[in-house]
Amino acid sequence: MYSDKVMDHFKNPRNMGEIKDADGVGVVGNPTCGDVMNIYIKVKDDKLEDIKFKTFGCGAAVATSSMITELARGKTLEEAIEITRNDVADALEGLPPVKMHCSNLAADGLRAAIEDYRKKKGGEKDD
Ligand code: FES
């Protein structure tokens, strides 16, 4: 029921961990299951220089957060904020319908981290 890609990212998550001096941190919870996701970003020249995640969630949440770190790394903030849960699911070659909500955590977490970074920068315009 899970694609090989999902299993791969679940068993060998990319970019798992924490960035101690992160420029932005996103913390989101999933109201459906109570799982929690933290996303840490480092930003340089308006690009995501580094991104890591910590997930207290199910296997699909681990796989989707691992995948979103790969999709987002090196992108501009504008590009990264456009990544949707469907992009993540597509990159993983699909998720079972009952697990689609898990990919919200990854997409929302990334967006929250970017918003946190922009807030910390304070007052500066988004673009
Ligand atoms: Fe909670 Fe998947 S069941 S994130």
Image (spheres, grey):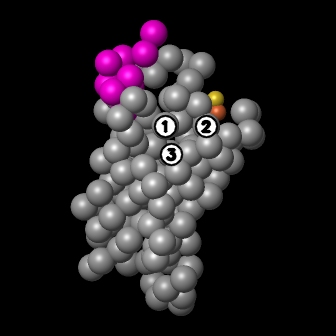
Circle 1/circle 2 CB separation < 8 Å? yes
Which residue is denoted by mark 2 in the rendering?
Answer: 57
Q: Specify the amino acid type for callout 3.
A: Ala
**Which residue occupies 50% across, 17% down?**
96
Q: Amino acid at mark 2?
A: Gly
Q: Position of residue 45 (x, y in %)?
A: 27, 79
Mark 2 vs ligand 1: CB below 8 Å: yes
Residue 26 appears anywhere in the view:
yes
* Quadrant, the N terminus: top left
CA neighbours of label 2 inside 10 A, class few (<14), some (14 to 19), many (20+): some
Residue at 33% over, 54% down: 72
For mark 3, give the secondary structure: helix
Question: Looking at the image, in which quadrant does ligand 1 appear?
Answer: top right
**51 vs 37: above or below:** below
Q: Is residue 41 magenta?
A: no
The residue that disc 3 covers is 106
Q: Which mark is residue 99?
A: none
- Characterize the local packing of mark 3: few (<14), some (14-19) or many (20 or more) Cα atoms within 10 angstroms: many
Q: Is residue 84 visible?
A: no
| Mark closest to the chain's N terminus, 3 or 2 | 2
Disc 3 Cβ-to-ligand 1 distance below 8 Å:
no
Image height check: is 76 above or below 109? Answer: below
Displayed quadrant of residue 97 = top right
Magenta stretch, residue numbers: 1-9
Q: Measure the alpha-carbon separation of dots 1 and 2.
A: 7 Å
The answer to whether the residue labelled 3 contacts the one labelled 2, judged by CB atoms less than 8 Å apart, is no
